[in-house]
Structure formats: structure tokens, C-alpha cells
Image (cartoon, rainbow, N blue to C red):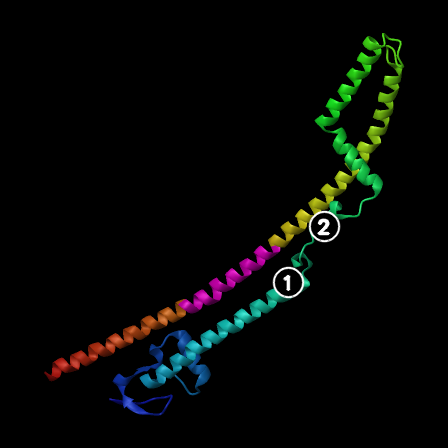
Amino acid sequence: MERTCSITGAIVTDKDGVMWMQLRPTLQDFVKTIHDGIDAGSFISYDALNEILHAYVASLTAEETKAHDVLMHDVSKQYELDETLQPINPKTAEDKQLSFGERLSDKIADFGGSWKFIIIFMSILVAWMILNSLFLMNKGFDPYPYILLNLMLSCVAALQAPVIMMSQNRQEDKDRERAEYDFKVNLKAETEIRLLHKKLDHLLLHQHRNMIELFQLHLDLTEQVQQRIDTLKKEDNERS
């Protein structure tokens, strides 16, 4: 039985084409967009169907490329506008220009909080007491009960306390700036993870869907080819 192709107008047998209703719904919608006058009774030859399939695959590829370009444009724009995605300068209080007093207080606090200071300090105390008690027989410059030594210790304690407090204040500033830096890093990581999820969603929703569509289309075509082969074999058997 001869039929007229609704796409090319060529006259072919009904074995050399398919009915429009046999196509996949997505492919039917695509045929409607590129050809007018297609209805349920339309017949499409295999030659026209091949051209349609090429155009359909090209359309899916173009759609995916466009969606990818839009996504990358949105991501690039968000990188430009979102302050949390800007490069972070890990500048802390340690990088600032310190005054002489601040540097001196840091060195004194570091030295005063070490075992080196404790050993030297205890050695001076022991030497002071041995010198005045044993060698000078409590008749030296600071006999027992070491009033001068107590005065010097009180002065050292009185001076050491504000120096340590100054160093602690600077340490608090350092910790505060480190905490702000960590917060910015975590916020940037969270934003970039959200953008990564957006890309993954695009991959799953668009590319995965298109891959399934092409795979199902391939199965349909394979089935049609197998049906045509079975028909030809049946005709050969009837002739023989």
C-alpha cells in the first residue's frame, strides 16, 4: 500500500515509514513545531524521519548548551555581586604595624610566661638570699628579712600586671579577627557548596533527562528496525 509522506510529499509504501502516532510524545511535539498540518493520520517516511531525528538531537544539544550558558552566566554574576564569594585576605592583628610599646609588651609577656623566666628569677632570689645571709652574715646591702628584695618584687609585680593585661588585650584582638576570618571562610564555603548543588541539580534535571530521552528514542528506533526486519523476513518466506 502506497502512502504520501506528510513531510516531504514523497510517495512510498507503508513499510517505508511510520505513522505520526507511533512516535514518542516528545518527538511528536517537536514535529509539530517544525511542520504544520501534522495530525493523527499523518504518515512520515523513514528518510524524513531520519532528518527529523537529526534535527531533534541537535535541538536537545542546543537546549542543553543554552541552559548551561545561562547557568554559568548566573554563577559568574553571583561571584561578581556576592561579597561572600570575593577573595578573602587573611590579615590579622599580627600583620598590622605595631608600636614600640606593643612589641615590648609582647616580648615581656612571652618571656614572663616561660620556664626560662622562672628559673632565672628563682636563681636570682636564691643568690640574693645566700649572698646577704651566708657570705655577708646579714650585714650586707639587704639583710634578713630582705626588705629591698621585697620592694623589688613588688615593683616587678606592679609593672608586670599591666604589661600582661596589654598583651592579653592584643591577644583578644587577634582572636577576634581570626574568628571573623573563619566566619568569612565558612560563609564562602557554604555559598560555593550551594552553587555546586545548583550545578548538580542542573546536571540531574536537564542532562539526565535528555540522556533518558535519547536512550528511549534509541530503543524505539531499534524496535522499529526489528519490526521492519521481521516483515521482510516474513515476505521472503512467503515468496519461497
Q: Range of the magenta residues?
A: 191-211
Residue at horizontal 77 percent and vertical 48 percent from the top:
96
Residue at horizontal 40 percent and vertical 77 percent from the top:
27
Q: Is residue 62 above or below residue 176?
A: below
Does any portion of residue 42 appear in the rendered image?
A: no
Spatial CA span between label 1 and label 2: 22 Å
Q: Secondary structure at mark 1?
A: helix
Residue at horizontal 73 percent and vertical 46 percent from the top:
177
In depth, the one of 234 and 102 nearer the eye is 102
Which disc is residue 79 wearing?
1
Q: Residue furthest left?
A: 240
Does any portion of residue 197 appear in the rendered image?
A: yes
Judged by its main secondary structure, the magenta piece is helix
Q: Position of residue 29 (x, y in %)?
A: 43, 78
Q: Position of residue 97 (x, y in %)?
A: 80, 47
Q: Position of residue 22 (x, y in %)?
A: 33, 77
Residue identified by numbered label 2: 91
Q: Is residue 122 above or below residue 137?
A: below
In depth, the one of 105 and 148 nearer the eye is 148
Q: Residue furthest front?
A: 135
Amino acid type indicated by mark 2? Lys
Query: Is the N terminus in the top left, top right, bottom left or bottom right quadrant?
Result: bottom left
In depth, the one of 93 and 195 nearer the eye is 93
Q: Residue furthest top?
A: 137
